[in-house]
Amino acid sequence: MEPAGQLSDERPSDEELAALALAADPDAPLAADAVAWLGAPMGLLPGWYMGATSGHSASRGRRIVTLALAAGLVGGCALGLCVTSGWVQLA
């Protein structure tokens, strides 16, 4: 393995990585000029985890259908009908 600060085309072995990880101080502060693995600073959450909002509101009809479906499921549970397995069953 190359000394710290030098780049190499060789990939370190698992044993070398394990030895470095075990020898490292977990409480050591990061250097002020430390660079992220991807080369760019990361936000609080990655883009694939929570995408941007769509920016348009749902139509009135879609909103009514969604609310009716939710109310039907809540009402069914209140009446003792279980729909957790996909088929309506008496709980």
Image (cartoon, helix red, strand yellow):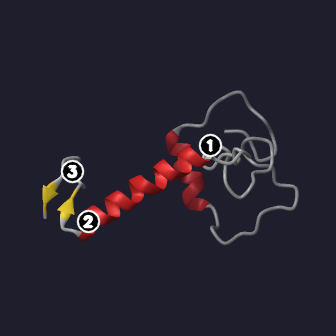
- Quadrant position of the C terminus in the picture: bottom left
Q: Position of residue 18 (x, y in %)?
A: 52, 50
Say which amino acid is labelled 1.
Trp
> Local crowd at mark 2 within 10 Å, few (<14), some, or many (≥20)?
some
Q: In the picture shown, does residue 40 fall above or below 32?
A: above
Q: Position of residue 41 (x, y in %)?
A: 80, 50
Label 1: state its secondary structure.
loop
Question: Mark 3 sits on what residue?
Answer: 85
Question: Mark 2 sits on what residue?
Answer: 77
Label 3: state its secondary structure.
loop
Q: Position of residue 65 (x, y in %)?
A: 47, 48
Name the side, left or right, on which 12 lies relative to 90.
right
Name the image quarter holding residue 61.
top right
What's the distance in space between the residues labelled 3 and 2, CA to CA?
A: 13 Å
Q: Which mark is residue 18?
A: none
Which of the marked residues, 3 or 1, is nearer the chain's N terminus?
A: 1
Which of the marked residues, 3 or 2, is nearer the chain's N terminus?
A: 2
Question: Mark 1 sits on what residue?
Answer: 48
What residue occupies the far left of the structure in this picture?
Answer: 90
What's the distance in space between the residues labelled 1 and 2, CA to CA?
A: 34 Å
> Local crowd at mark 3 within 10 Å, few (<14), some, or many (≥20)?
few
Name the side, left or right, on which 88 lies relative to 29.
left
Q: Are marks 3 and 1 in contact (CB under 8 Å)?
A: no
Say which amino acid is labelled 3.
Ser
Q: Residue at x 62, y 45 (%)?
A: 59
Q: Position of residue 72 (x, y in %)?
A: 34, 58
